[in-house]
């Protein structure tokens, strides 16, 4: 196992090391002290453990690596992730999993505003609650919220799916509740198991796009 | 004319001591916090420190003159019992009587002198330059006090000047630092000018400070004034507000501008980024959270720490 102490080494050294890896390896990062862009752009199935709180864009653009943060993360954790797993034991700040294409992001605590904004195919499981405007313009993938969701959930959503166990403060434009089919419960059960989050799929409600924003309306055509 | 407007950065830090040793070490705890935010605001920096309350019947004012060699002494020749302390371009004076009378007389004779702050404990210092140089210039590292609010500025809305730097005084013992940008500041400024509030710069944050001054003058409590700010200020903001015995935090409902808080038995600390708090003693055991949008948080020596819903 390779250990980096960020009170000695720079984030650049850590990230270069991850970029240069050819064979998967265990990497441990000590004293992160909220530094930005830790473990960004990893490209092999390394196992990275960050022992403390990380700053912005932690594990961004991840491919294949399994990255775990034993603390909180700042804005944009796992932003644009392609594959692999990112697990946050604490809370996440805004825009967690923004534009993520694939892989699994698990936040065991809460995530704040705009979680899963413009999601493009990844799965995100939040053990706690999410802030306002979560899943805004989310195109594909799944957002599972075990706690509550803030205002304007799923505003202008495309084909991503949202599952919420707690209270929804309000739905955004074009986001509606949808029934759960047996296949949805099965899929949710599998996802919760992969996320290692203990929750009963039967307790969740499902939300998605009403698809009324897909086409322009000509309501006022006669006015012009 | 700037065609491309960058995302406004700016950094905010606040530290409120709950235990005597933190009061003693205030400067040395606070300097690394603000220095860490240099990257968010390298143009200029400023801070308000609350310390050494003026005795009853006296008031403390901080004045700024563009020249470091300005002779302050004659200004106070007729002020019996006044004491002055000169720190670079700033002069901290404790005078008997009213700050308003003194500064009104000063304004006619020395228009180049700016009043940075007035009150019992507050001292505001701000200058152009890198945050560490500004803090060094005013000897912050060795200072003690009850609490401090600081700002590192990346100017986008108005010129890089000392007057455009934060904190802005919003009344006796009150000050404001702002990360964000207000879109209705021109109209608000005109409205506030009609109410008798004066402005020195084209800065949007100064308008927010003027707005709070006006609300407080109209009889609002600080919590009420901040509640009204949520309705009347259009734009992005994370505010930290220094008060005589504590501080307050408010984020706009959209909450694009970051803030993180940490509390232990010894202190409450707030910053734009967690990095800034990472070096504080006991941070690993602290309660760490992100303040919710549109919610007023206040801390005060007078009452138990609590959050007040707006």
Image: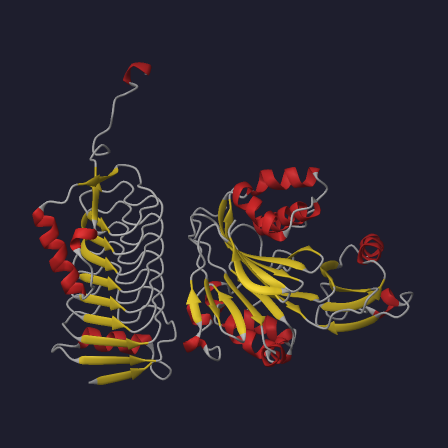
Q: Does A103 sit left or right of B243 as displayed? A: left
Q: Nearer the viewer, residue A51 or A166?
A: A166
Q: Is residue B187 visible?
A: yes
**Percent position of residue A15, x then y:** 26, 74
Q: Nearer the viewer, residue B198 or A152?
A: A152
Q: Going 34% across and 76% down the picture, which residue do you hit?
A: A52
Q: Is residue A158 above or below residue B279?
A: above
Q: Nearer the viewer, residue A174 or B107?
A: A174
Q: Does A180 sit left or right of B193 as displayed? A: left
Q: Going 44% across and 46% down the picture, which residue do you hit?
A: B3
**Percent position of residue A152, x then y:** 33, 43
**Percent position of residue A206, x then y:** 20, 46
**Percent position of residue B48, x then y:** 63, 65
Q: Does A41 sit left or right of A55 as displayed? A: left
Q: Going 89% across and 66% down the picture, which residue do you hit?
A: B79
**Residue A222 in which image quadrant:** top left
Q: Is residue B203 visible?
A: no
Q: Does A103 sit left or right of B87 as displayed? A: left
Q: Is residue B151 above or below residue A53?
A: above
The residue furthest top is A222
**Residue B299 in which image quadrant:** bottom right
**Residue B58 in which image quadrant:** bottom right
């Amino acid at each position: 196992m390779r250990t980096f102490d960020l009170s000695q080494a720079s984030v650049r050294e850590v990230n270069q090391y991850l970029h240069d890896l050819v064979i998967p390896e265990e990497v441990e990062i000590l004293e992160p002290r909220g530094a930005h862009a830790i473990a960004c752009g990893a490209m092999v199935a390394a196992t990275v453990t960050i022992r403390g709180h990380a700053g912005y864009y932690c594990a961004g653009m991840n491919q294949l690596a399994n990255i775990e943060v034993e603390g909180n993360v700042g804005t944009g954790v796992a932003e644009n992730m392609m594959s692999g797993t990112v697990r946050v034991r604490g809370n996440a700040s805004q825009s967690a999993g923004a534009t993520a294409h694939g892989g699994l992001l698990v936040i065991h605590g809460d995530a704040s505003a705009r979680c899963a904004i413009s999601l493009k195919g990844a799965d995100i499981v939040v053990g706690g609650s999410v802030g306002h405007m979560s899943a805004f313009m989310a195109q594909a993938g799944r957002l599972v919220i075990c706690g509550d969701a803030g205002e304007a959930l799923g505003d202008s959503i495309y084909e991503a799916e949202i599952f919420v166990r707690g209270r929804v403060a309000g739905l955004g434009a074009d986001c509606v509740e949808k029934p759960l089919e047996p296949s949805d419960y099965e899929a949710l059960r599998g996802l919760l198991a992969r996320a290692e989050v203990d929750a009963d799929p039967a307790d969740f409600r499902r939300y998605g796009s009403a698809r009324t924003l897909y086409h322009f309306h000509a309501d006022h055509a006669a006015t012009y | 004319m700037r065609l491309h407007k960058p995302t406004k950065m700016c950094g905010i830090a606040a530290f409120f001591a709950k235990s005597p040793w933190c009061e003693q070490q205030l400067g040395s705890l606070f300097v690394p916090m603000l220095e860490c935010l240099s990257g968010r605001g390298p143009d200029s920096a400023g801070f308000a420190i609350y310390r050494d309350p003026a005795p009853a019947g006296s008031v403390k004012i901080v004045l700024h003159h563009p020249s470091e060699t300005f002779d302050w002494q004659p200004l106070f020749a007729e002020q019996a019992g006044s004491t002055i302390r000169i720190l670079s371009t700033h002069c901290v004076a404790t005078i008997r009587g009213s700050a308003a009378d003194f500064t009104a007389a000063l304004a006619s004779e020395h228009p180049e002198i700016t009043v940075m702050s007035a009150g019992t404990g507050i001292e505001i210092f701000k200058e152009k330059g890198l945050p560490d140089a500004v803090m060094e210039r005013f000897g912050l590292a060795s200072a003690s006090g009850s609490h401090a609010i600081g700002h590192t500025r990346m100017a986008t809305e108005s010129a890089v000047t000392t007057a455009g730097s934060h904190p802005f005084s919003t009344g006796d013992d009150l000050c404001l630092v702002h990360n964000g940008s207000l879109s209705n500041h021109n109209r608000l400024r005109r409205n506030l000018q009609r109410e008798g509030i004066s402005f020195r710069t084209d800065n949007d944050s100064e308008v927010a400070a003027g707005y709070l001054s006006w609300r407080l003058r109209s009889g609002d409590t600080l919590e009420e004034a901040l509640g009204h700010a949520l309705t009347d200020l259009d734009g992005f903001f994370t505010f930290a507000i220094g008060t005589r015995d504590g501080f307050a935090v408010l984020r706009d409902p959209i909450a694009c501008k970051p803030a993180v808080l940490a509390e232990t038995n010894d202190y409450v600390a707030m910053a734009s980024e967690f990095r800034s708090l990472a070096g504080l003693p006991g941070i690993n055991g602290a309660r760490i959270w992100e303040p919710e949008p549109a919610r007023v948080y206040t801390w005060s020596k007078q009452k138990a720490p609590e959050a007040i819903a707006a």
